[in-house]
Amino acid sequence: MPKILIIEDDKFLRELITRKLSSENFEIIGAIDGESGLKMLQEQKADLVLLDLILPGMGGFEVLAKIRQDPQIANVPVIILSNLGQREDVEKGLKLGAVDYLVKAHFTPNEIIEKVKQSLVKTS
């Protein structure tokens, strides 16, 4: 059963995505800020990370950069899920190594689940 780490400070959205992914037989772990999310990933080795960018403390771009610099977790696929939809933000996220960049307002939870599945198929 693939394990997904959701790093998202919005409790409602985190719980909604958790429910959706759990119903699709994914194991879910969640973090509400970048620092605890990074620590959780290092300790529990998720198969994929859904990462918000606007987080308390360490922001999503910094979390992504730290993931890519850590040889233990550098190859874990990261999908950015953010309200930041500017082209520069998308380009920065992809350049830092995200496998996909989803703007929250443009995707339904079901579409997010599909993106997760596609990214897991690509990396397996």
Image (tube, helix red, strand yellow):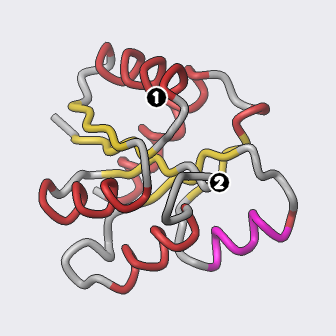
- Which quarter of the rendering shows the C terminus? bottom left
Residue type marked 1 = Arg
Please name the residue shown 26% across and 52% down the image. Answer: 47
Q: Which mark is residue 101?
A: 2
- Which quarter of the rendering shows the N terminus? top left
User: How many numbered dots are placed on residues in this image?
Assistant: 2
| Front-most of residues 57 and 109 | 57
Please name the residue shown 40% across and 78% down the image. Answer: 66
Q: Which residues are magenta?
A: 88-95
| Front-most of residues 57 and 4 | 57
Magenta stretch holds residue 97: no
Label 2, secondary structure: give it: strand
The residue carrying pointer 2 sits among few (fewer than 14), some (14 to 19) or many (20 or more) residues within 10 Å by Cα, namely: many
Query: Where is residue 43 drawn, in percent x and y?
Result: 13, 60
Instruction: State the residue position of label 1.
Output: 14
Query: Where is residue 23 drawn, in percent x and y?
Result: 31, 13
Q: Tell whether 86 sits left or right of 37.
A: right
**First along the sequence among labels 2 and 1:** 1
Residue type marked 2 = Tyr
